[in-house]
Image: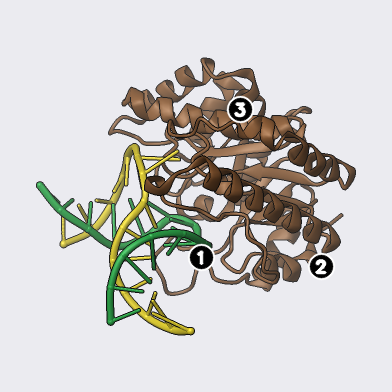
Chain colours: A brown, B yellow, C green
Amino acid sequence: MKIGYVGDSKIQSFHSARRFRLASYSSEKFFEYSKLNIEGISDNITYSVESNLLFYRIRSEIIPFASHEICNDNWRDKFKTSFEKIGTFIQDKCMRISTHPDQFIVINSPNPDTVKTSIRELQYHADMFGLLNLNSSHKIQIHVGGAYDNKNESIKRFIKTCKGLSKEILAHLAIENDDRLFSVNDCYIIYQETGIPIIFDTLHYAIKNDGETLLEAAHKSFSTWDKEDGIPMIDYSSQQEGLRIGRHSDEIDVNQFQQFIQLTRPLNFDIMLEIKDKDISALRALPFVVY
DNA sequence: AGTTGTCAAGCTAGT
DNA sequence: ACTAGCTTGACAACT
C-alpha cells in the first residue's frame, strides 16, 4: 500500500508546472520550461522517496503545449535521457506513477475535433510513460466524459473510441468514477467491454453512487485490475465542511482516514490524495497506511 | 513589489 | 443565453 500526492510538494519549493502563454510560444521557451519542469518532477520524486511517499502524480503541464498543434519541437528526443534516468529511479525505488489529463480531455464527445485533441493529449501522456520506461501498472486516469442527455449512448461512444486507441495509450488508461454522471457501476460497463480498470474515487462515490456500500463499490472497482494493471489505485479525498458538495478539503481529516483504512482493511490498494495541502496531508496519513 | 486577471481545450447545472 | 465550477497554479498585466 502506497500513498502520495499530486504535483508539487507544499513543504518543499519544487516547481514542475511552469507555464507560458500560447501567444508567446517559442522553441526556446518551450525547451527551457520543459527542462525546468522535468527537473521539478525529479526533485519531487527524490523527495517523495526520502519521505516514504511512493505514489506520485505527474502534472499534465510538464511539457507545455505538448499535444497542441503549435508544438513541433521534438521534446521526446531532447529529453529522452532525462526521462530514462527518472524512470530508472522510479523503478529502483518501487514507486508508482499516475497522470490525470484534465477536464478538456473527453473521448466520448460527439464533437470529433474534441475527440481528436483528447487523443493527442492521451498519446502525449503515453509517450511520457514510454520514455520513463514504465509498465502498464502506471496509469493515465481520465473521466468517462459527458452524458449529452443520453448516458447509454455516451458510454457506447466511449467504448467505440477506446477500440481505436493506440496500444500505448490502452496499456496505461484507467477511468475514474465521477461525482455527477458516471458511477462505479457505469464505469464497470466500460470495463466489461474494454478491460480498462476503474480507479475508485472515495469522494465521488460518496456524492454519486447507486446505493451500494463503500466496500461493495471498492470491491467492484478493484475487481477490474488484472495482473498487468497492478494493485488497484484509489483517489482519496474528503468533503470540505460547510462548502459546496464535491469541494475537496483543504487538509486531511486523519480520524476519517483512519476509519477508512480500518473499514477497507482486507483490501490492498495505493492511495492518491486529492487534498489541497498535498504532502502535508500525505505525511500525516502515512502512519495509518498498512504495508 | 504586490495585486488582480487570465490562460488551449469541455461539459453540466444553475441562473 | 450565460456563466461558475471542476482543480489550480502560475504567468502576464496591471497598480
Residue type at mark 2 is Pro
| Left or right, residue A134 beside residue A183 | right
Closer to the N terminus: mark 1 or mark 3? 3
Q: Which quadrant of the view contains residue A139?
A: top right
Residue A239: which numbered mark, if any?
1
Residue C4 image offset from top left, x and y in percent: 29, 62
- Marks 1 and 2: CB-CB under 8 Å? no
CA separation, marks 3 and 2? Answer: 31 Å
Name the residue rendered at 41%, 51% in the picture. A21
* Numbered circle sitting on residue A67: none
The chain that hosts pointer 3 is: A
The amino acid type found where label 1 is placed reads Gln
As drawn, which residue projects farthest toward the right?
A92
Q: Which chain carries label 1?
A: A
Q: Mark 2 points at which residue?
A: A287
Secondary element at image label 1:
loop
Task: Specify the subunit that label 2 lies on.
Answer: A
The residue pinned by badge 3 equals A196
Question: For the residue labelled by badge 3, is the local secondary structure a helix, a strand or a loop?
Answer: loop
